Image (cartoon, coloured by chain):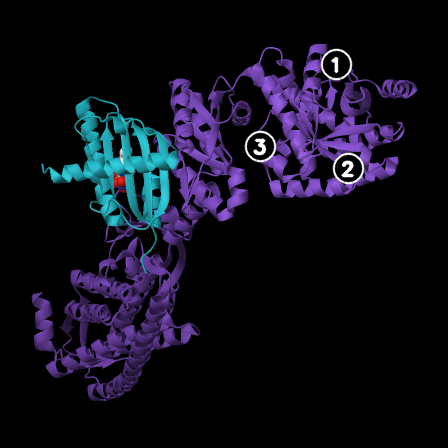
Chain colours: A purple, B cyan
Amino acid sequence: MQRFYTCLAEQHDPALLALAVVICAVGAHTSFVLLRAAQTAAARRWRWVALTALATGTGAWSTHFVAMLAFAPGLPADHGAGLTLASLALVVLVCGFAFQLALSGRGWREWAGGVLAGLGITAMHYAGMAGYHLVGVLLWEKRLLTLSIALGILLPMLAVWLALRQPRPLPRLLAAALLLLGICALHFLGMAALIILPEPGGAPLAAAASADWLAAAVAAASGILLLLSLAAAALSRRAHRRERQAEQKLRSLADAAVEGLLLCEEGRITGSNRSLQGLLGRADEWFTGQRLEALLPPGQTLPAALAAEGRAEAEFLAASGEIIPVELVTRPLLHHARSQQAVAVRDLRDRRRAEARIRFLAQHDPLTGLHNRAGFGLELERALALHGRSGQGFALLALDLDRFKWTNDTMGHQVGDALLVKVAARLRAAVHATDVVGRPGGDEFAVLQLDTSQPEAATALAQRCIELLSRPFIVQGQVLNIGASVGIALYPQDGTDIATLARNADLALYRAKSEGRGTHRFFEAEMDTRMQRRRMLEVELRSALALRQFHLEYQPLLGLDGDTVTGFEALIRWAHPERGLISPAEFIPLAEETGLIIPIGEWVLREACREAAGWQEPATIAVNLSPLQVHSPGIVEAVRGACAAAGLDPHRLELEVTETALLTDTDHSFGTLRALKALGVRISMDDFGTGYSSLSHLRRFPFDKIKIDRSFVADLGENADSAAIVGAVIVLGKSLGMLTTVEGVETAGQLAHVRARGCDQVQGFLVGRPMAADAARTLLARRQAA
Amino acid sequence: MAEPLYRLLYRSKVAILGTTEEVRAEVAAILAGARRHNAAAGLTGALLHEGATFTQVLEGELPALEEAYDRISADLRHTEFELMQFALVPERGFGGEALAFLAPAELDAAGLAAPGDAADAANGVLRRMAAILGRQQAAPG
Ligand SMILES: Cc1cc2nc3c(=O)[nH]c(=O)nc-3n(C[C@H](O)[C@H](O)[C@H](O)COP(=O)(O)O)c2cc1C
């Protein structure tokens, strides 16, 4: 240190020394401004590298030689021109390679480039020294020499690394200072290491001349340096402005983005946009410098995709504490010449809400908010999975509204819909929180009861449902009375899969409905067999007509005024090839339910008319019309067609309708009857006394005949009421101008009784059982003969 | 222009399980909730709790009345629900309170038998409720 101090203070001219340091500083700073330009240059980087090398080289070189000019060892000295200029060329070239290397990539290249630059500068110094001649012997102090070289390499290396890594103006100044320090350390430690032994007899050198050309060369180099420096300063300002503009543009672009944007580098956030700030409710400053993990709710880890490139879903924690589902799309990005990640942050809340809404809509009935068929099915599956594992039972209740269709048809859909909403509310009141209510469709409802104490719990629930739904409803100011029937299937005894359970609950419901409604039934295996027979019958019924399995039988009617057979009632028979005769009581309701009664009924009409057309006049033929036939639009045409095809006078055809046919859509039904009557056909009221026996029906339509049901005749003997009713109806018929027929007359006593009351016709086993067509013909022929 | 007024009258059987004390407490709770609802909906009426029977009359405009009825008719704390009257009325007959509570000290025979047709029965019940209400108001406490 002592030597160094002596060297600086006593052997150097202070003014020149100061100039050397200034030149060195200018050179160092200029170098790094240019290096930055080279770093960010998109194209033709080598030009910038060359300028940088020129600045570094001339800076170091000028520093060296100005310092040498300042050096006054007290002995005449000389600088060899060749080596002096060669050393300039050397340092510029080596620095050129060094910077090219340092800019070619991160890591070791930066370090190696720095080392190379240091080497170039060091080599320049000692090459210069090699050209330094003076009268005396030059000796080197090893330790200081080593230190000089070491610092001459190390400090520039650090400077280059810093300049490349921290391109902002302040670190750049620091880098320039480091370079300055390196060059000065190299030079002055090198000079301190120099020991000059004067050589007494040495020839004096042309010191003055030597100093002159050197001064000129140094001045020229410094001039170049100054120019470079001015250019660099301008460049730096421009670059700075551009950078700022670009940054601003980028920022406003980022802020304009709807999606949140994050910039991050090595796991730390370096920037955020306004959307993201708004999304998380945090200020810009909060983000900068945070670790990415700080965005997540506590305890969550970063999705792998966030670290590199790709797409991931995650949750972010907002300042408010809300956890926000987000989608992250990460892209690598070169920003400030450093590789970073840009992360687009998409708020998934709306999408999640929409998804949840769609799921809800797909599984619920929009009218009542209950589970729809699909949603209820899912609940059943869940129950099955849950209880299947634990072996616990549950109940499936199928529920059907009684009289809903009628309400809907007569009051309109709006009232029907409002009613369904109220039904749903009552069902919700009937069930417990763990039960699930569904509306698979129309006026069908279903309840899944997750209760293990079966069948008691299901019984109680069914009774609650039925009781609640039997209470009157008030819909838009109108009082409506409906009711409900319930069928129950239990898991696991009535089925272990959804389809079986649902079917069995429906079977039980069917039973509940057919046994009076307003009640509940549990599934029983026997229902299944009955239903199967029914289904089989239905299939066979469909083909029976084509297979000609039907035929008619004819039951005679006896006119009491002349005691003659006045005609027959046609009765359908189904002779099944395997099952034998199937009772009409079994297949007619089925035909009615399935609508098959229409083609079957038409066949009966045609067949009966055809047969009757062969009879002697005025024998009549009576044919039953089912309610569905009365309501079917083609019935008048069918009757006209049957008579016409057979050539039968319509006066000889009697159509028998029951009161049930008149109960629904009454106006239309009476219209149909009037149209039939207009054809000339006669209309009878069948089974009178069994159904509603509304006298208003008799008043509203001029029936030709009233047929008194067989049940009254059966207890004519024992029951005074029956006798009174039969008598009254006969009187009523007479007063309305209608004939009366009593059905089911089996004994002479009964016949005598009704005859005494003034009945017009009788029918029953006493008169004749239903018989085949030819037997009927024979009977008629006999009558004619008689 | 005043909206049309409707009156609702029904009878039901108490279906609250528990001791007399518990039943009384539950009825008090029903009453408190009902009064709150009714006052907010502009409904007035009276609830007669007599032995095991509830008889309630409720009056007001249609939407509010229908809504209250929806809730009452879905309540499992009573059963054997019998709607005796639902009709347009020219004016309120029980306009004094959101829900007056009638608890006659002794059963009188008029409350049990109501001969005649449905309308007569309803009117008889209404007259009797009005009488009890009048008696209660005349004897404070
Ligand atoms: C006999 C009886 C009478 C009731 N009367 C009324 C009433 O007048 N108004 C009413 O809002 N709720 C009445 N309720 C209660 C309703 O049924 C239902 O429980 C209540 O309105 C629900 O109110 P919350 O949702 O505040 O519990 C009555 C309940 C019973 C059992």
Answer few, some or many: residues within 10 Å of disc 2's Cα (few below 14, many 20 plus, some between 14 and 19).
Answer: many
Answer few, some or many: residues within 10 Å of disc 1's Cα (few below 14, many 20 plus, some between 14 and 19).
Answer: some
**How far apart, in angstroms, are the residues tagged by discs 1 and 2?**
27 Å
CB under 8 Å between callouts 1 and 2? Answer: no
Chain of the residue where label 2 is placed in the rendered structure: A
Residue at 29% across, 76% down: A240
Chain of the residue where label 3 is placed in the rendered structure: A
Ligand number 1: quarter of image: top left
Along the horizontal axis of the image, is A672 left or right of A408?
right
Quadrant for residue A510, please give it. top right
Nearest the viewer among A20 and B119 is B119
Residues at marks 3 and 1 on the same chain:
yes
**How far apart, in angstroms, are the residues tagged by discs 2 and 3?**
23 Å
Instruction: Decide: is A486 above or below A229.
Output: above
Residue position for label 1: A765
Quadrant for residue B93, please give it. top left
What is the x, y in percent for residue A114?
30, 64
Residue at 39% across, 18% down: A456
Residue at 62% across, 40% down: A700
For marks 3 and 1, the one nearer the N-term is: 3
Along the horizontal axis of the image, is A372 left or right of A243?
right
